């Protein structure tokens, strides 16, 4: 099922992206001749490959992020959501939107809401009214080969969305009892790794994205070299084009709650080949960066005031060594690497200072120098982040403040009534944004 206000989209100008989002409230089914904009994106993607693959821009020291736009997704607003992803060759940002039981599509160049593809489980609640993330969906999302969106759902399926028809073309069961969560795509071998994080024990399923055939599963139960994550789960997988291997965040390694790990999976042998332990970190987000390194987003804090430690780590994928500790930002879920600006970004809603005070932020880390650049306030809901290397837009979904919340709840939320996707830019290039859009 898909609902898109294509007529509003076609009338919109690049200088008025919020008008598109407001018009999107009248959602209509698209007629065939109205698919022009996204269809042109699909046709242009091959021509953009050279542009994306070009040399990275110089890293900017002390980069300060500035909120430049908020995107209204219409429908029921944006309250519950999960992972997001950017395909720069399509100028397309996609978000797992549980409030509307859909994957939302956003133009990454001008911040306009394109529409949504429904047919997902949506937000599932426990009897006491709290969210049951283990059964909710969509969850993880990734764009495969610039042609399809693969999205995990709460019923242990991966749903495949055809970007030409903007409809669900297939649903692949991983055989679990709970949601298919985060995922990563091996573009060389056309293999997708998806994590059933809430099953006990959790497992990774490897799927051929050409045939949609399940190639194998790796169960994290303490056998065959895997960590025993039966009660602690697994998190974000990533794939490195340099090594050809998958890497999976494991929040706890062994019985020590202060030690996590990043596990290494070979997609060819369909086996786990190594574990890289990390101290004082519960790995959640993972982003592949330069020099065969990766940023590990640590979700929990350690120790007691005034010595609370909330941090991020930069890990060598050559040997598992920690090459940098970033104590200025932690409490992260999704993290992202922008290869054009050579910066990591963190969705750190659980960030704590040394006294244990939680301050939700978008964190910025210079991947070239392996040093912290800065934080900007976001929202207690802001755990997802993705960046477009062309426009340098950094997208941070923000959930609305639930009705009946105490006064002053989530005070830094830029869109407390309806929720939104907040868009940030580095201040050093803020004035050049229009020029970059013209050159697109």
Image: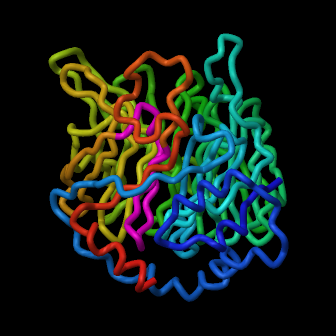
Q: Is residue 171 left or right of residue 190?
A: right
The image quarter containing residue 135 is top right
Q: Nearer the viewer, residue 162 or 273?
A: 162
The image quarter containing residue 220 is top right
Task: Residue 192: give x, y in percent of width and height.
Answer: 65, 57
Q: Give the residues in magenta.
A: 378-397
Task: Residue 64: give x, y in percent of width and height.
Answer: 22, 55
Q: Is residue 220 left or right of residue 288?
A: right
Identify whether 12 is placed above or below 361.
Answer: below
**Res. 225 visible in picture:** no
Q: Nearer the viewer, residue 315 or 92?
A: 92
Q: Is residue 291 magenta?
A: no
Q: Residue drawn at (64%, 53%), measured in percent from left and top?
A: 104
**Res. 146 visible in picture:** yes
Q: Is residue 386 magenta?
A: yes
Task: Residue 224: give x, y in percent of width and height.
Answer: 59, 38
Q: Residue drawn at (80%, 46%), measured in percent from left and top?
A: 119
Task: Residue 329: give x, y in percent of width and height.
Answer: 27, 39
Q: Nearer the viewer, residue 55 or 417?
A: 417
How many numbered marks, from 0 up? 0
Q: Residue drawn at (79%, 60%), measured in percent from left and top?
A: 212
Q: Residue drawn at (26%, 59%), measured in percent from left and top?
A: 367
The image quarter containing residue 134 is top right
């Amino acid at each position: 099922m898909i609902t898109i206000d294509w007529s509003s989209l076609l009338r919109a100008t690049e200088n008025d992206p919020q008008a598109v989002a407001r018009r999107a409230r009248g959602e209509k089914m698209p007629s065939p001749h109205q698919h022009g904009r996204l269809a042109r994106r699909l046709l242009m993607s091959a021509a953009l490959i050279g542009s994306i693959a070009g040399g990275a821009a110089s890293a900017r020291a002390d980069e300060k992020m500035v909120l430049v736009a908020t995107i209204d997704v219409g429908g029921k607003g944006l309250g519950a959501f999960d992972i997001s992803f950017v395909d720069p060759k399509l100028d397309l940002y996609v978000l797992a939107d549980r409030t509307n039981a859909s994957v939302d599509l956003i133009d990454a160049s001008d911040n306009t809401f394109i529409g949504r593809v429904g047919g997902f489980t949506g937000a599932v609640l426990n009897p006491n009214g709290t969210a049951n993330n283990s059964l909710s969906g969509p969850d993880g999302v990734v764009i495969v080969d610039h042609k399809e969106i693969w999205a995990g759902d709460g019923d242990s399926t991966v749903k495949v969305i055809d970007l030409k028809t903007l409809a669900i073309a297939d649903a692949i069961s991983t055989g679990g009892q709970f949601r298919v969560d985060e995922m990563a795509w091996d573009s060389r071998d056309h293999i997708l790794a998806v994590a059933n994080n809430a099953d006990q024990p959790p497992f990774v399923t490897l799927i051929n994205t050409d045939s949609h055939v399940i190639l194998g599963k790796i169960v994290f139960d303490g056998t065959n070299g895997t960590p025993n994550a039966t009660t602690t789960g697994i998190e974000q997988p990533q794939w490195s084009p340099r090594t050809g291997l998958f890497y999976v965040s494991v929040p706890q390694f062994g019985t020590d709650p202060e030690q996590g790990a990043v596990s290494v999976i070979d997609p060819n042998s369909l086996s786990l080949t190594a574990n890289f332990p990390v101290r004082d970190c519960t790995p959640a987000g993972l982003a592949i960066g330069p020099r065969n390194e990766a940023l590990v987003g640590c979700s929990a804090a350690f120790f007691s005031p005034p010595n609370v430690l909330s941090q991020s780590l930069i890990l060598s994928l050559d040997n598992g060594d920690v090459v940098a500790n970033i104590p200025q930002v932690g409490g992260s879920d999704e993290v992202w690497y922008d290869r054009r600006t050579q910066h990591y970004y963190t969705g750190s809603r659980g960030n704590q200072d040394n006294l244990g005070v939680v301050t939700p932020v978008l964190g910025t880390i210079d991947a070239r120098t392996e040093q912290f650049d800065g934080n900007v306030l976001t929202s207690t809901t802001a755990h997802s982040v993705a960046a477009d290397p062309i426009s340098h837009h950094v997208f941070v979904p923000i959930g609305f403040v639930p009705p009946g919340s105490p006064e002053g709840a989530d005070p830094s939320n830029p869109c407390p009534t309806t929720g939104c996707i907040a868009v940030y830019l580095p201040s050093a290039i803020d004035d050049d944004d229009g020029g970059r859009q013209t050159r697109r």
